[in-house]
Amino acid sequence: MKYTTLNSYLKERFGCKVYKLAIDGGFTCPNRDGTLGTRGCIFCSKGGSGEFAQSSKLSITEQLEKGKALVENKTKDGKYIAYFQAFTNTYAPVSELRKKYYEAVEHPDTVALSIATRPDCLPDRVLELIKEINQIKPVFVELGLQSIHKKTSDYIRRGYELEVYDKAVEKLHNIGVNVVTHLIIGLPGETEKDMLESVEYVCRVTDGIKLQLLHVLEGTDLAEEYRQGRVKTLSLEEYAEIIKKCVEIIPESVVIHRLTGDGAKKDLIAPLWSADKKTVLNTINKTLSEN
């Protein structure tokens, strides 16, 4: 089975090993600040999915340096992608975004910028800024879609329609920006067919894809649903089999940025097997290699 991994793509594009360093820019989200809601998406952790980022109390440069220190034993001449991960990283005044983005791309060891955001948080002025920076160093914009299905998006309180995603991808491509789409595998109420339809849909337009296991984390509304017995999570074997079917329909032109993901162990309620990352990856790789 042939597919394009992020590691191989980055090595080919930049000529060396490239690590992503997670940054917390200190932003919030329209699903948190009262614009759309105050509780966030049903699965979203209190850290806005940025638990592995450095502290937002540090400057962008300080966060990058701390991130580099964590992987310095793995590389001597590697380069880095500055990854604005926590919450919605285009949801702030352009003047603030400009300052933080430029501090990240001006770091001498940074080869690219990655910005995680929502498709409904890309106004024209932000797009102009991203276009400007993309002419200095490559920019990846990561869009949290999770599912193409309206019933699911309503349940998880995503807060925007699929058409908003479509328009965001088009606008980002029009300014020459690489688009990465996040999907969650195992969302409540979704069948395997539903999940594969989401993968097939986004692969028609996206440059990269991130497949994320549904985690039930402490402090989320999903945790309450789980405790009430209204939500079930996948077994490792079920997840690996679905991932295999996803990979089979992802063209080589679409870079696979992730086949699973980590939830902070201190907050993880289910599935507990996901905390053993080595076993998870070994199981996925074994399943992918099977005929």
Image (tube, grey):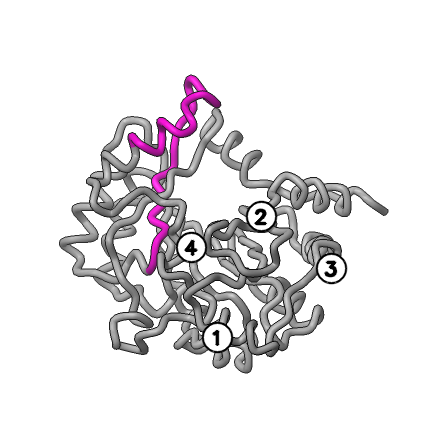
**Left or right: residue 263 compared with residue 235:** left
In reply to whether residue 66 is colored magenta, the answer given is: yes
In reply to whether residue 32 is colored magenta, the answer given is: no
For label 2, the crowd category at 10 Å Cα-Cα, with few meaning under 14, some 14 to 19 and many 20 or more, is: some
The quadrant in which residue 60 appears is top left
Instruction: Tell me which segment is drawn in magenta.
Output: 65-87
What is the three-letter code of the residue carrying label 4?
Glu
Q: Which residue is mark 1?
A: 156
Tell me if label 4 and label 2 are in contact, CB under 8 Å. no
> Up-down: is 159 above or below 124?
below
List x then y, in percent, for residue 164.
41, 73
Separation (CA) of disc 1 from disc 4: 19 Å
Instruction: Give the residue displayed 45% in from the left and 30% down from the top.
Output: 14
Pair 1/2: label in front: 2
Instruction: Specify the farthest residue to the top.
Output: 76
Q: Which residue is mark 3?
A: 238
Q: Earlier in the sequence, mark 1 or mark 2?
A: 1
> Up-down: is 61 above or below 122?
above
